[in-house]
Image (tube, rainbow, N blue to C red):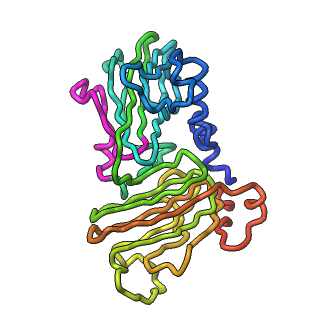
Amino acid sequence: MAPTFKLQCHFILICLLALRGESRYLELREAVDHDPFPHLAGGASPKRELEGEPLYSRALRCVDMLSLQGQFTFTADRPQLHCATFFIAEPEEFITIRYDLVSIDCQRGDILQVFDGWILKGEKFPSSQDHPLPTTERYIDFCESGLSRRTIRSSQNVAMIFFRVHEPGNGFTVTMKTEPNLFPCNIISQTPNGRFTLVVPHQHRNCSFSIIYPVAIKISDLTLGHLNGLQLKKSSAGCGGIGDFVELLGGTGLDPSKMLLLADLCYPLRGPAQMKVGCDHTVLRMVSSGKHINRVTFEYRQLEPYELENPNGNSIQEFCLSTL
């Protein structure tokens, strides 16, 4: 695996756990080991809160990742100046973050900001091209808005909090919950293997599905509205001049707009389209004009180590491995 993105995530340890597919395991194990409520240790998922039962709760670390609904408290034991919490839900869910209690000193330089998406080493997901809001509006600063925006909802299945707390004993408590998203757009997968159908119904927007692993990906169904009843000849210029198409991107960072275009599809499939991508980060991105209902179904699995060492067939790997 190319080292660039891995080194970024070594810098933020909990992100490395997420990229290795361990965030859900970490949260589940903590729920079982430390939470007193028996439904968390039984067969039911901790994400499904039962009526009348308290939410799962625990303390936050300075750098942390959360994939379960619950109430989380950060209390500084010393000045903590560079902290972040990454939230991730299921693909078909929004995230809501509610401030329950805040005790910080904004005048002294404390910070508490929610970001709509993830940002890591200056790279954002979703990219500025794909998010419905300008970047400045994706930050919600507690020191500016106070509790007038007590509850904040993400635009996709990931969000994060940046915070800085100088005084020991100060901190905050937030509750994370999820809501259904009927037409998910811009998703980070929690798992290295899966199957998903991305649907964009008459909306002028771009949607990316992010897999932070080297994967084999197979597109089994592609429905673009402009293809209905048409037989088009493929242009050597690719799909850039067509309003509705799908891109396959690869790279070593988080931002899809900075990744390499590996393939694009804007014409009828004559069978499944598949490719092995040896990049740390693989993105399937759908660009929609808003004139049609567009749909793409695909499945993906993490590449085995031997597949990375001995690439063959329809494989894209050299670009990623040469980026150090």
Look at the image and tell me whether residue 233 can be seen: yes
Indicate the position of residue 200 as horizontal and vertical percent values.
34, 62
Task: Give whichever of 168, 202 is nearer the camera.
Answer: 202
Q: Residue furthest left?
A: 148
Picture coordinates of residue 54, whole percent (x, y): 41, 19
167 within the magenta span:
no
When the figure is inspected, residue 229 is found, relative to residue 102, above or below; the finding is: below
Q: Residue at x 37, y 42 (%)?
A: 94
Q: Which residues are magenta?
A: 132-158
Q: Is residue 206 left or right of residue 89?
A: left
**Residue at coordinates 35% horizontally, 43% vertically from top-left?**
180
232 horizontally vs 293: left or right: right
Counting every numbered tag in the picture gives 0
Name the residue located 30 percent from the left edge and 50 percent from the top edge.
134
Q: Position of residue 161 (x, y in %)?
A: 41, 32
Please tell me which residue lies in front, 183 or 5: 183
**Residue 12 appears in the picture as rendered:** no
Residue at image position (47%, 56%) is 209
Q: Residue furthest top?
A: 169
Query: Which quadrant holds residue 127?
Result: bottom left
262 versus 106 height, above or below: below
Residue 17 occupies quadrant: top right
Q: In this rendered view, identify the residue nearer to me: 50 or 193.
A: 50
List x then y, in percent, for residue 108.
Answer: 35, 18
